[in-house]
Image (cartoon, rainbow, N blue to C red):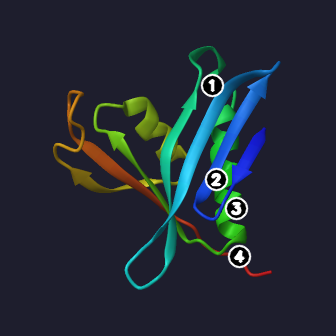
Amino acid sequence: MARRQSEQGVDLNAYYSDICVGSIACRLEKKEGGAVCVYIMTLGVLAPYRGLGIGTKLLNHVLDLCTKQNIREIYLHVQTSNEDAINFYKKLGFEVTDTIKNYYTNITPPDCYVLTKFISQTKK
């Protein structure tokens, strides 16, 4: 895995034989009240490499970073018809927290779910 981290977020890439087969890109956002959360802009794995745990490993790495930085919330948008992605995130502890009508402008259906994971902090 290759990681690029900045004050604005983190990008991770998973490689197999010098080929990028998976990637996640996240950004930090400030919520009302000053708390920081993470927004997953994209997470993808090339089709032949799906089901091998690459997406889970990428996401778990980001979740570990959130825990280390005391970030308690991570969220993303998923098209309402993307059952594979919805099931993937639910399996990792995300829950549907909102539905946004007409979120997308160039795809059908245009609606999305907001999936959120609230991260419990462990005492060290």
Please state which of residues 73 and 86 is positioned toward the viewer in this rendering. Answer: 73
The mark found on residue 65 in the picture is 3
Image coords of residue 104 (percent x, y): 24, 38
Location of residue 108 by image quarter? top left
Measure how far apart labels 1 and 2 are at the Cα level.
23 Å
Seen at 57% across and 67% down, the residue is 119
First-in-chain label (4 vs 1): 1
Which of label 1 and label 3 is nearer to you?
Answer: 3
Which of the numbered marks, if any, corresponds to residue 51? 1
How far is mark 4 from mark 1, CA to CA? 29 Å
- Residue type, mark 1 in image: Gly
Which label sits on residue 10?
2
**Camera-side residue of 5 and 100:** 5
Q: Are marks 2 and 3 in contact (CB under 8 Å)?
A: yes
1 and 3 marks in contact (CB < 8 Å): no
Q: Quadrant of the N terminus?
A: top right
The residue at which mark 4 appears reads as: 122
